[in-house]
Image: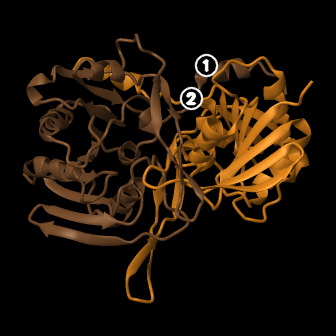
Chain colours: A brown, B orange
Amino acid sequence: MEKPFIFVTNDDGVGARGLNALIEAVRPLGRIMVVAPEDSQSGMSHAITMNSPLFLRKVREEEGLEVYACSGTPVDCVKMAFDSLMSEMPALVLSGINHGSNSAVSVIYSGTMGAAIEGSFYNVPSIGLSLLNHREDADFRAAVVYSLKVIEKVMNEEIELPMCLNVNIPDLPVGEIRGIRVCRQNKGYWREEFERRVDPRGRDYYWLKGIFQNQEENATDTDECALENGFVSIVPIQIDLTDYRQLDLMERWKW
Amino acid sequence: MEKPFIFVTNDDGVGARGLNALIEAVRPLGRIMVVAPEDSQSGMSHAITMNSPLFLRKVREEEGLEVYACSGTPVDCVKMAFDSLMSEMPALVLSGINHGSNSAVSVIYSGTMGAAIEGSFYNVPSIGLSLLNHREDADFRAAVVYSLKVIEKVMNEEIELPMCLNVNIPDLPVGEIRGIRVCRQNKGYWREEFERRVDPRGRDYYWLKGIFQNQEENATDTDECALENGFVSIVPIQIDLTDYRQLDLMERWKW
């Protein structure tokens, strides 16, 4: 039987260590197509490129592996792959392994999760994978072990589609990770402390410097709690943003 | 009593006709601060600028009105305003009026809605406003009438926070709009037909050209249905993306 076809992308760019660790890890499992951004697209969320065209560059081609770099966002990469490059539907979409956490509300800022969510729109099980270490030279060994555990589970369980998983992995040696928890998204938000500097021409400029505000510090069923306790967190994701509680309240309004 | 303080942003940029129509419409209601992107940031979703610094430029200052242009995304504009510019919390966040629809799944690609959602993280009622006409010279007269109806309702009703509303307005003369419907987000997705062209140096490039695929053509309680029938649609929005159905299914998995 032919090996399954697997699509891989990320938001840190085609040269990122986390992407290449994931590619090497999944090569034995199937035929791999990678379309990843040329450069870092961290924090690009579900952005698409509407005001400029996209360029595509073949980076690598070997038995069972094709790698492309795309000038656009992570979501552009997914769209380009599915709607323009693929000749068959993949069995799986993987996005990552991201350098840095995408737990809690970070899911909505994350380019990694933007791509994973977009993958799930093609009715393919999609997994976003993130390591809680944003350094370029982060050690992905434990993240690879746990990524493979989740990937193999999704490939072997009877699953219901659509499925999109937000997987975050603590920055610990593999022996110190305590297991895997399926959980819900922690409530919270980011506040910025803008760092103001002055450029050589005397112009002010500002760097975003966010601090996460946890609104549920005592909850035990959230991704933040799992991660703080040394577990890998998995939050299944959907994109009906309707606030049904508010919908009920507002239905009483008279126009 | 001092007039309420209202914050306004958009994703089409500080020069957009829709933004300026909204500013003029709400000036009689309060003291207005605007921080909007320098250029078009359509399709930028919840993106934030992590890899470059932000610049801010004061564009206009009059009695009761301050307008800034920011080099970043719509969400950057909101963060910059709240965390760096404001000396008091606003009574309301308005984003728009967008040139083009943000109904159904477009909510997750939309820079307009990214900004509105970010505003709601500050516990301020936030409203994204969009007209179903993406042309630069669109006629915003009916959109202004209905935007004011929604704004005044939110300012005068007893509301529960957090509140974020996704308001879409049909491209019709005011007399032909049939009313306002509070509804849920229609299920569907976009498929792209990439238009391939060749640049003067012989390189291929691609333009995104999406087509909306409605997965609920017969539903009567969705924003798509309201708009198709000539109503203004209001979808209340929240950002817990947890797929609770999938969470239940997955809790049975053995790791």
Q: How far is the residue under mark 1 from the one under mark 2? A: 10 Å
Q: Is residue A27 above or below residue A146?
A: below
Q: Is residue A63 above or below residue B51?
A: below
User: Which residue lies at the image location 57% right of the left edge and 65% below the top edge?
Assistant: A201
- At mark 2, the secondary structure is loop
Q: Is residue B158 left or right of residue A183?
A: right
Q: Position of residue B176 (x, y in %)?
A: 87, 48
Tell me which corner region of the image, top left, top right, bottom left or bottom right, holds residue B64. top right
Q: Is residue B166 above or below residue A43?
A: above
Q: Nearer the viewer, residue A170 or A198?
A: A198
Q: Residues within 10 Å of mark 1 (few under 14, many from 20)?
A: few
Q: Which residue is mark 1?
A: A245
* Dot 1 and dot 2 residues touching (CB under 8 Å): yes
For badge 1, the amino acid type reads Arg
Q: Which circle marks residue B238 in the picture?
A: 2
Q: Position of residue A52 (x, y in %)?
A: 51, 69
Q: Is residue B96 left or right of residue B122?
A: right
Q: Position of residue A2 (x, y in %)?
A: 9, 54
**Location of the C terminus of chain A (image quadrant):** top right
Q: Nearer the viewer, residue A48 or A168?
A: A168
Chain of the residue that carries numbered disc 2 in the rendered image:
B
Q: Nearer the viewer, residue A119 or A21?
A: A21
For badge 2, the amino acid type reads Gln
Can you tell which of label 1 and label 2 is closer to the viewer?
A: 2
User: Which residue lies at the image location 73% right of the left edge and 43% below the top edge?
Assistant: B8
User: Which residue lies at the image location 72% right of the left edge and 33% below the top edge?
Assistant: B87
